[in-house]
Each structure stands twice: as C-alpha cells, then as structure tokens.
Image (tube, rainbow, N blue to C red):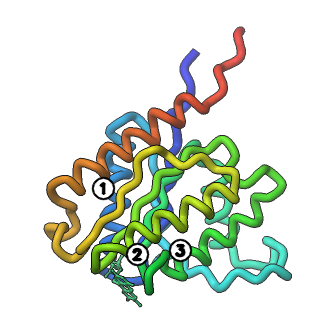
Amino acid sequence: MSQNPLHIVGIGGTLRDQSTSRFALEHALRAARAAGASVELLDLRLYDLPMYEPDKELADYTPNVRQFIGAIANADGLLISTAAYHGTLAGVTKNALDYLEFLSDTEYLHNKPVGLIATAGGDQADVNSIAAMVHVVHSLRGTVLPLSVPIHNAGKVFDGVIPTGRTADRLAKLGALVVETAARFRPAPALA
Ligand SMILES: Cc1cc2nc3c(=O)[nH]c(=O)nc-3n(C[C@H](O)[C@H](O)[C@H](O)COP(=O)(O)O)c2cc1C
C-alpha cells in the first residue's frame, strides 16, 4: 500500500529581506524534497506573528496564526532555522516557538524529528542558539536530530541565496536526515 509523501515543514528566517537563516533553511528543504518529501516553508517574515499572549485562545488570533499552528501539527518532521541575536536564538524565532503551546493537547512535537540550523555573524552565538533550541525542542517533546548546522561568519558562506562549501553539504545532509528519520517514526500502514 502506498502512503502519502512525508511532509517536512521549515520554520524560520528573520525579518530581514536577505535573511541567511532563511536561505540556509531553504537549502535544507530542497534536500528534503530531493529525498522524496513534500516541503513547506513557514517564513516568519511573511507570517508576521504578533507576540504570543497566553491569555488568548487560538480563535482570538488572526487566521495566519491558526494556519501556522496547523501546518506544524500536520508535519511529519521539522527544520527550524534561527539567527543568533545577542548570544542566543533571535526573539522572532522564540516567539514563533511559544505559539506551540497551542499543541499541548496533542503532546506538542511528540513523534516529530526536528533538525536545527543557526546563523551568526561571529564564531560562537550560532552554537549557543542551537543549544538553546535543543532545550526548547526537548521541552516540546520533539526529537532533536543527531546532526545540526551552526553557521559561523554567515555573511561569508553564501553566494547570493545559496550556501557554499561544507555548510551547503551539511544542510543537504540535514534535509535528507529529517526525511529518513520521519520515515522511521511514521506508523506502519494497517494490513488490508
Ligand atoms: C540584534 C542583533 C544581534 C546580533 N547578535 C549577534 C551575536 O551576539 N553574535 C553573533 O555572532 N552575531 C550576532 N548578530 C549577527 C547575526 O547573527 C547574523 O548577521 C545572522 O547571520 C543574521 O541572520 P539573518 O541573516 O537570518 O538575519 C546579531 C545581529 C543582530 C541584528
């Protein structure tokens, strides 16, 4: 029996037009598509999410917020890509992840593999940002993949929108790995 393709959702980018964290995410998503998945980019610049307010119900938010949560709920695997701001993940990313509180009734990211990407201008904050996101994903019951892609000196490793060298290779591996892992997590189809 054939199953639908695995669906991989990417969350990320900053609000910058030329966001390197979004370019990196797009590269990993292309690799996920090449590995056979359907892919979807939740570009945080386009979603324009307001600050998460715990007193509000999901119904109180605009339709783009509901669409954002629904897309994540439907994903078989996720890729999250942030910029590093002031030594850790950018607020725009953290605010987006705070909305996953709306998935508490379905155990948040349970059974979803999650690949992590971070870009930084310097040499350290990308690694810090990955570490911070590991804590977030664990608290959301997600499974962090055993490969993540911290990108130092991000301004120097992109040729336009395309990552180069080892960064490109690692992003491609991450995109393939999230698909391979999501396939292992998917329940076997019921016998006819
Ligand atoms: C407000 C702000 C704070 C930043 N803080 C750091 C930092 O602490 N360490 C660092 O290496 N880079 C820092 N950067 C540089 C960004 O991490 C870097 O430019 C990154 O590639 C931006 O991602 P983007 O291209 O997706 O916007 C900062 C940039 C901004 C705008």
Circles 1, 2 touching at the beta carbon (< 8 Å): no
Callout 2, which amino acid? Ala
- Of 127 and 121, the residue lying toward us: 127
Q: Quadrant of the N terminus?
A: top right
- Asked which quadrant contains residue 59, the reply is bottom right
Dot 3 or dot 2: first in sequence order is 2
Query: Horizontal placement of 90 versus 21: left or right?
Result: right
For the residues labelled 1 and 2, the Cα–Cα distance comes to 15 Å
Q: Residue 81 versus residue 128: which sits nearer the camera?
A: 128
Q: Nearer the viewer, mark 3 or mark 1?
A: 3
Q: Classify 43 as above or below 115.
A: below
Q: Which mark is residue 13?
A: none
Q: Name the residue that disc number 3 marks.
A: 93
Asked if ligand 1 lies within 8 A of label 2, the reply is yes
Q: Nearer the viewer, residue 178 or 36?
A: 178
Q: Nearer the viewer, mark 1 or mark 2?
A: 2
Disc 3 element? helix
